[in-house]
Image (cartoon, helix red, strand yellow):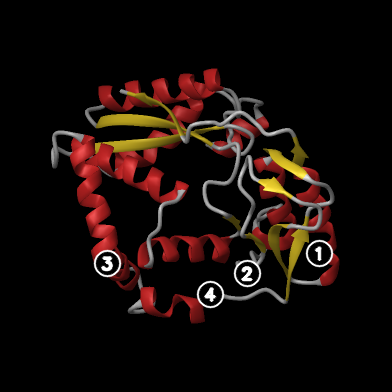
Amino acid sequence: LYAVRDVTGTVESIDLITASILSKKLAAGLGALILDVKVGTGAFMETADQAAALASSLVKTSNEAGCRTAALITDMNQPLAPAAGNALEVAVVMEALTAPKNSRLVELSLALGAELMVLAGMETAPEVAAVKLRDALQSGAAAEVFDRMVADLGGPVGFSETWRQRLPEANVIREIEATSAGHVSAIDGHAVGLAVVRMGGGRLKEGDRIDPSVGFSEIVTLGAEVAKGQPLARLHAVSEKAAQAAERAFLDAVTIGAEPEARPLIHARVT
């Protein structure tokens, strides 16, 4: 369906996006569904109006199809986690599961999970559900369930204990340093993602081989104050040539200037 939208110039059609996203979910026979609709520089919907229109269309269509559905519109003006790249993002998730700390990733995961528990009739209030989810995270129960999921899908047993040894490491790893002092006033998430793709972390054309080891980790947060020479991120590349191109792309994607206005992680809830 996406290929048809691409060649017909209808990639941005809300109706066709709705059909593309929901067809798989509804075909699975879900009874409840929570959707995370992104908005910002790293999202397909870059404006609040676009994101609200898509969220409303998704929620309305899914509810009318008999699936209890809600959506959270969430910020994507910076990476949700401090990493971009396949194995590097898995590492962040495993750290959140096995040694949970307060972070944007954990905050949003708890919010989405709490909404889903209410939609599924497991709890009556998201606040109560969020407490139970945090308890499952802190106790290690969530990691145990994840381990069973990985094993059931044919992956290694006990992945939560061995993931550091199993995830691939890039040939070239080095820090990207700020070229000036100030605040991180903007991060072009689309540009960061494209830099990962060009390093081999995604496909430029069908059939391209993906290198899961490449990308960026320890990415600076939006609004952070940095000094000249301070690390903005850690670069993981397959070669020095690829590293140089990715470093230039990352520096171009990060704007150092005045302190930006704080943005909430969750912009709105749509039911």
Dot 1 or dot 4, earlier in sequence: 4
Q: From mark 4 to mark 2, how far is it between C-alphas?
A: 8 Å
Mark number for residue 140?
3
Q: Position of residue 23 (x, y in %)?
A: 38, 36
Q: Residues within 10 Å of mark 3 (few under 14, many from 20)?
A: some
Residue labelled with disc 2 = 213
Q: Which residue is mark 1?
A: 242
Amino acid type at circle 1 is: Ala
Residue 39 pos. (x, y %)? 54, 31
Q: Earlier in the sequence, mark 3 or mark 2?
A: 3
Occupied quadrant, residue 40: top right
Q: Residue at position x 49%, y 77% from top?
A: 164
Q: Quadrant of residue 170?
A: bottom right
Secondary element at image label 4 = loop
**Are the residues tagged 4 and 2 within 8 Å (C-beta)?**
yes
Q: Position of residue 176 (x, y in %)?
A: 76, 60
Q: Nearer the viewer, mark 3 or mark 2?
A: 3
